[in-house]
Amino acid sequence: MFDPRPIKLTVNGKTIEATVEPRVHLADFLRKQLALTGTHLGCEHGVCGACTVLVNGATARACLMLAVQADGCAVETIESVASADGTLHPIQAALSRHHGLQCGYCTPGVVMTLLELQRESAGSALPEDKIRTALSGNLCRCTGYQGMVDAALEILG
Amino acid sequence: MKHHDIMPAGQVGRSVPRLEGRQKVTGRAAYTHNLVLPGMLHAKVFRSTIPHGRILSIDTSAAAAVEGVHRVVTGEDLRAIVAEPYFGPAFHDQPALALDKVRHIGEPVAVVLAEDPYIAAEAARLIVATYEELDAVFDEVEAMTSSAIVHDVLKPAGTFPDLKHLVGKRDTNIALDYQLRRGDVDAAFASADHVYEHEFKSQQVMHTPLEPMVSLAAPDGDGLLIHTASQSPSFVRIEIARLLGWPENRVRVKVPYLGGGFGAKLYIKLEALVAILALMVKRPVKLSLTMEEQFFTITKHACTFRIKSAVSSEGRVTGRRCEVYWNGGAYADIGPRVTQKSGFTAPGPYDIENVSIDSYALYTNRPPAGALRGFGIPQLVWAYESHSDMIARDLGLDPVEFRRKNILREGRPHATGTLMHDAEIEGVLEKIAERMNWSAPFDRGEGHIKRGRGIAIAFKASISPTTSVAIVTIAADGCASLAISTVDMGQASDTAMAQILAEVLGLATEDIKVIHPDTDVTPYDMATLGSRSTFHMGHAVRLAGEHARRQLDELAVSLGYAPGAAYAPRDLFKKKYGMQAGNIVGVGSYIPDYTSPAPKTGLSDNITPFWMIGGTGVEIEIDTQTGAIKVLKLINAADLGLPLNPKIVETQLSGAALMQYGFTLFENMLFDEGQLTNGSLADYKIPGLNDIPPVIENHIVDARQTTGPFGAKGVGESATFGVSPAIANAIHDAVGVRLTELPLTPESIFNALRAAKSQAGKA
């Protein structure tokens, strides 16, 4: 019914060639075909932000993008953020240290949002309202956000 | 008391970052959501489109014909495996798929199994069911007398003695009528200087864990292995074994981390269906709900609360009558427990001589309601703390002063007759008043921007009696593993329990391995609910650690160490076995003392092992031209005993408060004749960072639970209690209108302002 199509993209720096049905969204492709399960699915409506990944360096909801749309793109997921030797990225370490997470389900999306923000800021300190606005697209039902903001302020503020 | 007085090892009381932090920030933590098994089929549920009716036919032929569909199953098909596939913690009233009748829109009617979830979803849309529609009832008060009867006959599970009298009862929607009688409330009203009577309503809302419910069952030898995002693995095992007529040891339940729970994932939800399906098709079956489907699965009780108080001219409350109606939806779930366990605290944390409570669990044709962070308490506090302010204002008393006159103090009897101990109601009230700078002048705003402030205090009794068991294994190198069935759904129970064990054994918290629930390995625990784990499992872990420690000490003495001399455990094993070999196993089992409430009066001299006390203060701003409300400051305070991990406690306080904040200001399941009209996160908003107050404070009140492990007790719900009435009280303070229905939207504020204006115009 839906003929699979070939796609070629890079995921976390690695070139991937695959065939996917046109109806498969990017999150399912990453999670099922590539076993990159750190990209979580919450609402599948593009609201909660749990599935946030970077596509060509910009945050994207992997539940709202079809895998075929990522053809030719560079995709980065949570699995690429820590160093190969296991050293946490400063954003990850700060979230853990500041208790900026509880159940951890929204956390990969939060990390990806902050990673984009950090690259955009290029080392200049960001005001708190900018950090809050950027994170307002990542819903967290557990923490009350305070530790998350504290962690982001430490790294980006 | 300082921590170091009672915690010499320094493991308890320090803000250890959560042990699984690394796994979670790298996206490598295990969730049932991620699990895939070889040969697994995906299930997709076809749901009822009418609120109440008899099933006439279910046509599955088109769905079954879709290429890639393995099988389509209806409720009647399930009977081949389980003749009576009804489950539930309080009533055996809920079928795994509808049988004979449907009782709410969204109820599971049939299920498609396919290797590809996209195919299963597509095929499920092709199922056609026909119904004979029946009259439906949606409102909890109407359900008391409605001719629409949701369940023809009541089927209590037999687990709870206070439900036994309901066996076989017909033609009623009342699933439980709980009552408490203390003193002479009629006499109190007759002799009162003032009598106040108000009615409050709270709306149906949903937990919204970001990991939607998911369960996976697989045949396992002659048994069944169930992987499930559940808060109660022991209960799932017992209930599945009951349904199948098996001994418990043929059912193995495993639970990894949960992407949030909040009460949604309690008792038994999807597990009965996947268990039966896996046995039917002899393959693993996974059912993953969407966010929308969660709204049909479990929710928080909508509630109507009529409260009436007798008050002296000095402002002492002398009598209180409470009538509480809980909208349980189509299936009882744990609603009857909410009705009773919350019901007896309905008069609030106040010292009132004469009390009468009637609390009713009602069936309606809405999606089922169960436990949600607070177990009914936030609905009660919403009413009694709004009522408190209304009385205080009418008498011209300061709201804090009015509460000071009436709160329950140490040693005084609660409505049940239980004497209050280790309950810092006063401490919570005073902490909030202090942080709000209550006695200082307050800026009331100007022009069309008005400012106000409000407070609320409350308490909750821990559910009782419940049991927790823990097993500690010391390996021959001296390291320790802790096997418990407590589920870490984000509250950091792994970390807190490791801290307790490390404290007892003199190890570092970070070196303890906590084994996640696996009912083949981890012993019984009643469930992870009601803020009970810190106290109950905390004691079990402490006892297990002490048991292991005692055996190590005895081993040391048997090997020639002087009693009390220091030793390294690894040296003991080496000496005893000649190599790195052997284990020491410590077991701890804990159940607190408890006295059941007397049947007619509801009285008990020991109603709970501990009280949770929470309170909230807010400062708000209202734009009188639009009704827009901004909460500028949110102060949370709680008595949680001594904190095992202060930072984790703070996130529990802020998280709980902001969840209730959503339930207070905007979250609302909207229905049109039983049809939910906003069942997605796009339409049902939960608080994001732009929605929350700019200033949030979380305070741990100076207290100690003398009966708790290392002075601690539960905290997961305490900060939910006071949020709704504190904000309603602040609205009244700012603009003089009183809202009695949640949520407190700009529209309802604006309408109330307009009504008040037209009233004033008439006067």
Image (cartoon, helix red, strand yellow):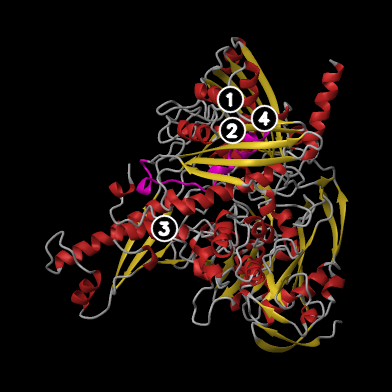
Mark on residue B399?
A: 1
Residue found at x 43% / y 39%: B594
Q: How far apart, in angstroms, are the residues tagged by discs 4 and 3?
A: 47 Å
Residue A66 pos. (x, y %): 79, 76
- Circle 4/circle 1 CB separation < 8 Å: no
Q: Between residues B576 and A132, which one lies in front from this camera angle?
A: A132
On the same chain, marks 4 and 1? The answer is yes
Residue B302 pos. (x, y %): 70, 41
Residue found at x 52% / y 30%: B349
Crowding at mark 1 (Cα within 10 Å: few <14, some 14-19, many 20+): many
Q: How far apart, in angstroms, are the residues tagged by discs 4 and 2?
A: 16 Å
- Circle 2/circle 1 CB separation < 8 Å: yes
Left or right: B676 with respect to B702? right
Left or right: B64 with respect to B590? right
Residue found at x 83% / y 29%: B754
Q: Nearer the viewer, mark 4 or mark 3?
A: 4
Mark on residue B497?
A: 3
- Circle 4/circle 3 CB separation < 8 Å: no
Classify B579 as above or below B546.
Answer: below
Mark on residue B455?
A: 2
| Lower position in the chain sequence, tag 1 or tag 3 | 1
| Lower position in the chain sequence, tag 4 or tag 2 | 4
